[in-house]
């Protein structure tokens, strides 16, 4: 305990002149209703800084990985999917009791208890599990999905220009008055981008295409925040893994390890928009289905792939393509709907599928994922739960949500578990 006190004293020693503003046991700085005195002009004659909230010690530091971009989903809501990184700068444990996403005085999302733990993973543990606790000096990632109902007439939701975050904490070793036992931090304001999702055509044709690992739940794609070249990148934030269900709801028939057991292996892949090819890989071998490959170098995780420039800073990534099936080369200008390759099982994959996402650079790894919408398709059904996806690999038919109303969708992003028909063009 004494060592902890010395660490805190040293860390916050430079704040000694500001402790009058950190009012001991209160969750937030008190608002006295009295405006602060006018600041004296600076010696250099430069203008004064804008008024700020009173200083408050922050046990947990919070940063956003990227500013969110709103995108409409098939659930009738506009989604703001983004991530926070939290770091406990204390020498003792901190419990996160709740995290609120706010717009002004309005709470748009509140995560508390198990709901917060479900979307939080600690950094630096071999098999990170859900948690609401941060050990001394420990960091964690939190994946957020702020979903706002669209208007009754289908018009876009009222999207705020800025979001703030209110973090409620319990400290294992409180040290009043700077660090009371419970604290509330208002942290990490983020600007909501006014960028619009790119409108594209689906990359596949036919019925029963399942959106596996898509936005916005805690899927492997959403959780793939990769530390590369000294920073975090979320290239797969909105990525979809496409597999095609058979009429009986099964994924494959026969030996799971054989590619021919998957009827959709070799399906045509179509360009989602007009634009030039930036990069192509077409010489990597097919993997054995039913098992995850090991020992892959980083640049082979996408397997055989195509990167296409869609314009306006949007790049399409088509991955895990069938060996030798790529029909285009860098510099070719693609037209929407053009057949460009076949669905395969190359790279980091344990069953044939098409991995598709849109990103903000031509590098499949060193990029941030961007939302996209498909111009039109038929939403036929939705799987009952994420467990239904796991059952597919045990040769079980995928149960669907009961009472689901099929619908024709326009300029909307598919969501995780959606099952769709993509019409011939």
Image: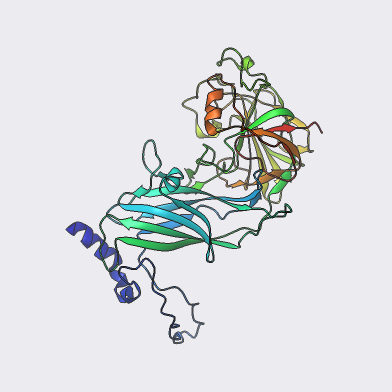
> Would you place residue 374 above or below residue 248 in this image?
below
Seen at 61% across and 53% down, the residue is 148
Q: In this view, does 208 lie to the left or right of 65?
A: right
Which quadrant, please, contains the C terminus? top right
> How far across and how far down the image is residue 30, in percent?
39, 74
Observer-nearest residue: 148 or 308? Answer: 148
In this view, 37 is above or below 357: below
How does the figure colour the protein chain or chains? rainbow
Q: Which residue lies furthest to the front in this view?
A: 403
| Residue sitting at the far top | 254
Between residue 421 and residue 407, name the one nearer to us.
407
Q: In this view, does 397 lie to the left or right of 374?
A: left
Quarter assignment of residue 406: top right
Q: Is residue 261 above or below residue 8?
A: above
Q: In this view, does 289 lie to the left or right of 376?
A: left
Can I make out residue 278 in this image? yes
Residue 335 position within the rendered picture, expressed as x and y whole percent measured from the top left: 79, 38
Q: Is residue 272 visible?
A: no
Residue placed farthest to the left in the image?
A: 2
At horizontal 54% and vertical 53% (from top left) the residue drawn is 66
Residue 294 vertical position relative to residue 227 in the rendered view, above or below: above
Q: In which quarter of the image is the N terminus?
A: bottom left
**Image location (x, y in percent) of residue 193:** 62, 58
Residue 92 in which image quadrant: bottom left
Residue shown at 78% from the left, 38% from the top: 336
Q: What is the tally of numbered marks visible in this picture?
A: 0
Q: Where is residue 277 in the image (x, y as percent from the top left)?
A: 71, 38
């Amino acid at each position: 305990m004494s060592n902890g006190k010395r660490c805190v004293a040293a860390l916050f020693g430079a704040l000694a002149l500001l402790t009058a503003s950190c009012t001991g046991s209160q969750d937030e700085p008190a608002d006295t209703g009295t405006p602060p005195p006018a600041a004296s002009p600076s010696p250099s004659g430069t203008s004064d800084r804008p008024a700020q909230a009173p200083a408050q010690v922050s046990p947990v530091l919070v940063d956003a990985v990227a500013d969110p971009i709103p995108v409409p989903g098939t659930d009738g809501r506009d989604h703001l999917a983004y991530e926070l990184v939290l770091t406990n700068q204390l020498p003792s444990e901190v419990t996160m009791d709740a995290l609120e996403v706010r717009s002004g005085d309005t709470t748009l999302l509140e995560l508390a208890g198990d709901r917060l733990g479900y979307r939080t993973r600690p950094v630096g543990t071999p098999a990170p599990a859900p948690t609401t606790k941060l050990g001394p000096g420990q960091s964690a990632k939190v994946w957020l999905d702020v979903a706002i109902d669209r208007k009754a007439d289908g018009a876009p939701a009222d999207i705020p220009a800025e979001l703030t975050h209110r973090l409620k904490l319990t400290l294992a070793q409180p040290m009043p008055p700077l660090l009371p036992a419970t604290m509330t931090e208002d942290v990490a304001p983020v600007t909501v981008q006014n960028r619009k999702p790119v409108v594209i055509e689906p990359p596949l044709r036919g019925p029963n295409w399942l959106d596996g690992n898509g936005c916005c739940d805690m899927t492997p794609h959403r959780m793939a925040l990769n530390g590369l070249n000294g920073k975090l990148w979320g290239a797969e934030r909105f990525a979809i893994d496409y597999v095609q269900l058979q009429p009986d709801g099964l994924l494959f028939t026969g030996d799971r390890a054989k590619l021919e057991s998957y009827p959709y292996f070799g399906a045509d892949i179509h360009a989602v928009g007009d634009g030039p090819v930036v990069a192509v890989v077409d010489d990597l071998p097919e993997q054995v289905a039913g098992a995850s490959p090991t020992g892959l170098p980083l640049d082979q995780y996408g397997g055989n792939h195509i990167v296409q420039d869609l314009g306006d800073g949007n790049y399409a990534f088509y991955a895990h393509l069938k060996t030798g099936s790529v029909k285009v080369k860098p510099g070719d200008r693609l037209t929407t709907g053009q057949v460009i390759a076949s669905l395969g099982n190359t790279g980091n994959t344990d069953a044939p599928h098409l991995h598709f996402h849109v990103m903000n650079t031509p590098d499949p790894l060193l990029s941030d994922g961007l939302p996209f919408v498909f111009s039109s398709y038929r939403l036929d059904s939705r799987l009952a739960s994420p467990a239904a996806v796991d059952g597919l690999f045990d040769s079980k038919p995928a149960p669907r949500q009961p009472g689901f109303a099929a619908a024709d969708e326009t300029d909307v992003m598919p969501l995780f578990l959606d099952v769709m028909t993509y019409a011939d063009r």
